[in-house]
Amino acid sequence: MYKALYIIAFLFFNPIIAQTYDVTIYEKIGFEIGGFDGALDNEDWFGYSVEGIGDLNGDGFSDVAVSAIKDDDGGFNQGAIYILFLNLEGSVLSFQKISDTEGGFTGQLDEWDVFGTSISYLGDMNNDGLIEIGVGAEYDGDGGYWHGAAWILSLNSDGTVSSHAKISDTVGGFNAPLGDEDVFGTDIENIGDLDGDGFLDIAVSARRDPDGGSDRGAVYILFLNGDFTVRDYQKISDIQGGLNGVLEAGDYFGGSIANIGDINGDGIIDLAVGAYRDDDGGLNRGAVYILFMNSNGTVNNFQKISNTEGNFNAEFNDDMFFGKSIDLMGDLNDDQLFEIAVGARGYQADGARNFGAFYILNLNTDGTVNSYVKYTEGLQHFHGNIDEEDSFGFSVSSLGILTEKTCIAVGAFSDNEGGFEKGSVWILQLGEILSIEEVVSESNAIFIYPNPSKNSFSLNEIDGVSDIQIFDMNGRKVVNYANMNKNLFDVSYLPIGEYIVNIYMENNNSNSFKLIKQ
């Protein structure tokens, strides 16, 4: 029986507070587990991709999107995603499936498209009140064999699709010369308005792109129009965009992408890109590149983190695939340095293949590793039942908050719970070990709502609050509220994006939260 996970209302992403990294509470979601009663079949690969999508239905609890890329709705391996609406315990209250036959999705999927290869929360990109998610279909055949595609779905609050746009070799204004087996759509990430034209941009990877040599991989920076078509692009590969011949054949650069904010303080967002078949130290051990970006989408400089570089001294094994998934966790320990979660689905435990693990890396401003914590069964008080070939850590995503604690969703797509490779997702809460009674008693902690917010936000309690300051992700203060006479704080004039809200108390304590401005 899995312990209950209490997710506090109205919060998404992570507060910036001092805390430990222990797993305090965990929940498993899979076939007839965790409140999920979706009709998973053998080899559906539920959990191939996971993504926190905020509070989509407005019930106060964070929701999550999960893919099952070998789902057969409409045809063999066409793929599907599930929008999971979570309850107070972190289990599934209800869900909506999106596939070729369900969820209001009218885009055409074909056999072997593997829709759901990646899922990315994009926010309200066009300011119409609906959030968008990016969905990869890396085996899509537009233009040629496995050229790949990226979908942008606008979601209703019930998880159904309101509208869609597709970017591939033949639609969406994208005129890059994709080739057979490039698998464009491997991962997708919102990178903000990189070029400053007023429209949000995205990064889309193609892990098998052959620039410089077979399967080296590439990342495309797509500068979008307001209708989600591509205005222009910049390719980053072994021979383009500023990497300058650092990749090797079979690296799969672009196996994952994460926007990690501006960690070097130059005013431009930076990216973490996985190359999970990199051979530093041994076969397919994996690596992560920290890319310090220019506003035109090229790489200014980079730092590699692997078995031999980046001050990362963890123990690797061959076929570990470190970097198969990445997500930004924020500043978990209040040291002014960002943490990222990195999956290693091939981590071996006592010789068990593809047991799986993930790491939380504390990054220096130069992209090297300051410290790290590893998570798998038996470490950091996590005692969930993981088996050989589960591929725990194949996907990771920052999800939500329990009082002052961070939650993370971890996919294990080849888990055999209920049937062969039906797959599963774990919800882990990180922080101080508490009893259930203590957890419940702490559920009255201060929080902001709604989050994401379009026009304004409030606090659940303003007594004892002295002032509120909002900073952009570059650390610049954009507004200060010192008048607490009214519990309504206007953010309508702020540009769409992510901000840090610092709440200062009269007792000299403070709390910080990440706010998504839509």
Image: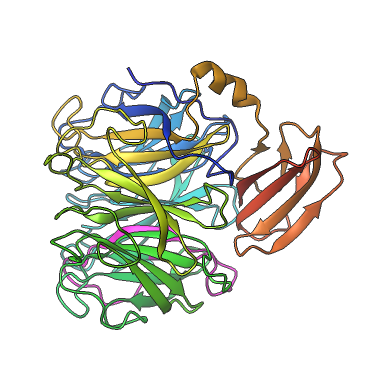
In the rendered image, residue 109, in percent from the top left (x then y), is placed at 26, 50
Query: Which residue does the image show at 41% across and 25% down from the upper left?
Result: 91
Judge whether 140 appears above or below 91 on screen: below
In the rendered image, residue 517, in percent from the top left (x then y), is placed at 63, 52
In the visual, does 147 lie left or right of 132? left
**In front of the other: 255 or 171:** 255
In the visual, does 322 lie left or right of 300? left
- Which quadrant would residue 300 be assigned to in this image? bottom left
**In front of the other: 322 or 509:** 509
Q: Is residue 360 magenta?
A: no
Question: Is residue 253 shown to the viewer in this render?
Answer: yes
Query: Which residue does the image show at 15% across and 36% down from the upper left?
Result: 388
Q: In which quarter of the image is the N terminus?
A: top left
In the rendered image, residue 201, in percent from the top left (x then y), is placed at 48, 66
What colouring style does the render use? rainbow
In the visual, does 79 lie left or right of 499? left
Q: Which residues are drawn in magenta?
A: 174-203
Query: Which residue does the image show at 61% across and 20% down from the upper left?
Result: 441
